[in-house]
């Protein structure tokens, strides 16, 4: 009898002492569902793609052949080097103008969008407006303004500025909202008015963030300016790329133009990375 | 001393501001941008938009076509991002300081990522147009290339940030390379990686419009078609569908992020 009861007890203990090594949490479920959904959509996408007249493998072979021609036999034919440099300057000019205008406008709207500096109604209104602006692709903004201004630099700068404003307002207002609440309270306690609070504490404290965000947007705007040249007739190096590809079918010139764009983009990325590194150090 | 500091600060700020103004005017000159014309065209565009740029009954008839193109665009965006993420994971593991196999492989993978990331999507689209012509594949590969570069870099930073100490601990116990990857690096980095993938899908929905205009596919092609035939009602309908799609995907992304992070 004793032996029997002892065995039963030890059995229960053994059974109840199992520990689950990998509990199924809400997070794990969400991760698996997300990955599964992405995989299913991808496979479905591949099955329904409109392949047109293209054969996949022959396209790939041709792609690598084209890459070889572009990157190892790059040369100018229609453009000269000075002309190419001038076009690059135009693209840089478009990007710079967009960034400057965007930053100035976004700075003021960003102040009103930050919840600790403005009331809730104004803040939410601006944020909703910004969400809409950011949802419309930049190229569509440029094309829409082209109807009124005609294709060219004016429509490009205005269209790109819209999107830059949306991006920078979000970035700036979040920088302002990170500010220590006590600083603002202290100044209010001294009787400072709104403008004094803004220019004596908010902007100086956020200056590093503002500059970094603005430069990052400049980097983005360079890529966008290339794209606007190609898609919306805005001029610059992107337009030459479009012509070389769509009208002259000149792979070598495309290669050379791509090198120009690539060099500039890498320089921007390097500077941008340095700025981010500085941010991390100071923070 | 303090007075000197303030004077210096004010002077350097003034110089910076002056430089900014000079560069602005230089940019205006070189791009032939006219500020007055710009401001006038904003007003004109708003006026035009209010009177012409909205869907009417005739435009609604084109909704099925637009939705079909929209689906194509969304599928391309998701497929290209997911595919790019798979490749980016391999390259990130090679390129990361924490998990790199050796210096040479690390440099190569980082280099490839840098090149593919820094060539703009527009350039990728125009380049690939030669070999794949006007088809979804062109758009797919254009977005794939840009996404691959971006995600590789994001994943490298994620791995370095999240996995460093646990990898060190496992190495100390004598664990081999692949056990380290599958038991430590991937599980701990996965939430952040998924977040980056969702972010890149949002970006690609927007970029896909541009790619569509350049390659004659997807929703961008629809807009280009209606726009160039002056069918602004249908064009505005396209814009609205894009906006709604971006909102929905952004909402879903935020929902998922809130759970997994």
Image (cartoon, rainbow, N blue to C red):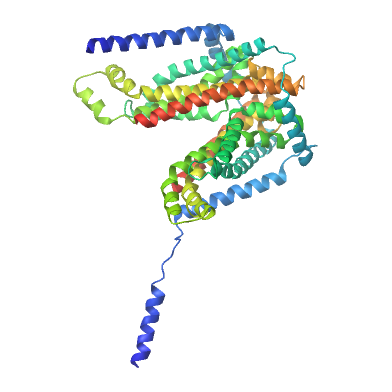
A212 vs B9, left or right, is right
Residue sitting at the far left? A190
| Residue for point 58% across, 10% down | B31
Q: Observer-nearest residue: B227 or B9?
A: B9
Residue sitting at the far bottom? A1
A236 vs A111, left or right, is right
Residue A223 in the image: x percent, y percent? Answer: 58, 24
Residue B140 in the image: x percent, y percent? Answer: 67, 37
Residue A217 in the image: x percent, y percent? Answer: 49, 24
Q: Observer-nearest residue: B182 or B79?
A: B182
| Residue B12 visible here | yes
* Quadrant hosting residue A203: top left
Considering only vertical position in the picture, is A199 above or below B125?
Answer: above
| Residue for point 37% across, 31% down | A281
Residue A270 in the image: x percent, y percent? Answer: 50, 26
Pick the quarter of the image with the C terminus of chain A: top left
| Residue for point 59% across, 38% down | B109
Q: Observer-nearest residue: A29 or A221?
A: A221
């Amino acid at each position: 009898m004793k032996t029997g009861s002892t065995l039963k007890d030890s059995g229960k203990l053994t059974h109840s002492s199992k520990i689950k090594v990998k509990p199924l949490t809400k997070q794990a479920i969400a991760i698996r569902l997300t990955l599964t959904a992405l995989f299913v959509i991808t496979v479905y996408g591949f099955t329904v793609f409109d392949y047109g007249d293209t054969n996949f493998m022959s396209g790939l072979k041709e792609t690598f052949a084209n890459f070889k021609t572009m990157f190892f036999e790059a040369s100018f034919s229609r453009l000269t080097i000075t002309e190419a440099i001038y076009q690059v300057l135009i693209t840089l000019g478009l990007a710079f103008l967009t960034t400057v205008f965007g930053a100035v406008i976004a700075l003021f709207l960003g102040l009103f969008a930050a919840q600790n500096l403005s009331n809730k109604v104004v803040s939410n209104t601006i944020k909703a407006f910004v969400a809409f602006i950011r949802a419309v692709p930049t190229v569509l903004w440029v094309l829409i303004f082209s109807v009124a201004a005609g294709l060219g630099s004016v429509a490009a700068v205005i269209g790109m500025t819209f999107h830059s404003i949306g991006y920078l307002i979000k970035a700036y207002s979040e920088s302002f909202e990170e500010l220590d609440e006590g600083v603002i309270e202290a100044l209010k306690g001294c009787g400072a008015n709104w403008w004094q609070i803004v220019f004596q504490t908010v902007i100086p404290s956020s200056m590093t963030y503002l500059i970094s965000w603005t430069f990052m947007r400049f980097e983005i705007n360079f890529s966008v300016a290339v794209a606007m040249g190609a898609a919306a007739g805005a001029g610059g190096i992107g337009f030459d790329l479009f012509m070389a590809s769509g009208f002259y079918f000149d792979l070598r010139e495309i290669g050379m133009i791509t090198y120009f764009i690539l060099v500039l983009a890498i320089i921007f990325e390097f500077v941008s990375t340095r700025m981010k590194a500085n941010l991390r150090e100071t923070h | 001393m303090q007075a000197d500091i303030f004077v210096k600060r004010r002077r350097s700020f003034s110089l910076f501001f002056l430089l900014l103004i000079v560069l602005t005017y230089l940019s205006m000159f070189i791009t032939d941008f006219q500020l007055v014309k710009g401001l006038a065209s904003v007003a004109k565009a708003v006026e035009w938009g209010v009177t012409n740029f909205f869907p009417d009954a005739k435009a609604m008839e084109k909704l099925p076509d637009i939705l079909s193109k929209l689906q194509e665009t969304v599928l391309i965006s998701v497929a290209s991002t997911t595919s790019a993420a798979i490749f980016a994971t391999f390259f990130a593991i090679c390129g990361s300081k924490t998990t790199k196999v050796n210096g040479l492989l690390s440099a190569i993978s980082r280099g490839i990522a840098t090149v593919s990331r820094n060539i703009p999507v527009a350039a990728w689209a125009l380049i690939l147009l030669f070999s794949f012509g006007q088809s979804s594949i062109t758009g797919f590969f254009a977005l794939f290339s840009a996404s691959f570069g971006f995600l590789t870099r994001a994943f490298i930073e994620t791995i370095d940030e999240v996995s460093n100490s646990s990898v060190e601990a496992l190495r100390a116990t004598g664990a081999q390379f692949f056990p380290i990857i599958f038991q430590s690096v991937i599980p701990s980095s996965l939430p952040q990686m998924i977040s980056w993938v969702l972010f890149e899908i949002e970006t690609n929905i927007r970029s896909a419009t541009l790619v569509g205009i350049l390659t004659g596919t997807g929703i961008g092609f629809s807009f280009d078609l209606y726009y160039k035939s002056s069918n602004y009602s249908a064009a505005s309908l396209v814009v609205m569908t894009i906006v709604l799609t971006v909102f929905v995907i952004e909402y879903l992304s935020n929902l998922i992020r809130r759970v997994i992070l």
